Amino acid sequence: MPASCRSSILIQLAQTVREIKGPFVTQVAIDGIDGAGKTTFADALAVELEKSRGSVIRASVLINNNDPDASRIIRAC
């Protein structure tokens, strides 16, 4: 995906998230297959949101789909 297109999508999504009003914390989930770029996209979205929204908490749940018995590893950054 061209950088300009990706940047445009990030800006539009960040604007949509900023417009959400309510009494609760806004949560955004990004899902997809391994290696699709979810973490890279989420990191870039967090940067975009921090520009005008203030604090952003990033958290990831890593699941090893190749090992159904593996326990979940939760990483917060």
Image: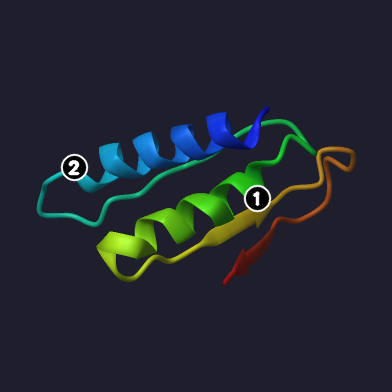
Question: Which label is found at residue 20?
Answer: 2
Judge whether 73 appears above or below 36 on screen. below
Q: Farthest right residue?
A: 66
Q: Quadrant of residue 77?
A: bottom right
Residue 32 in picture, x, y percent from top left: 65, 31
In the shown orientation, is residue 72 left or right of residue 6?
A: right
Q: Quadrant of residue 17?
A: top left
Q: Residue at x 27, y 37 (%)?
A: 16
Decide which of tag 2 and tag 1 comes sooner along the chain: 2
The secondary structure type at the circle numbered 2 is loop
Give 39 or 22, whichever is nearer the viewer: 39
> Which residue corresponds to mark 1?
39
Residue 56 in picture, x, y percent from top left: 39, 65
Question: Which label is found at residue 3?
Answer: none
Judge whether 29 appears above or below 73 on screen. above
Q: Residue at x 43, y 66 (%)?
A: 57
Give 32 or 17, whichever is nearer the viewer: 17
Are dots 2 and 1 in contact, CB under 8 Å? no
Judge whether 54 appears above or below 72 on screen. below
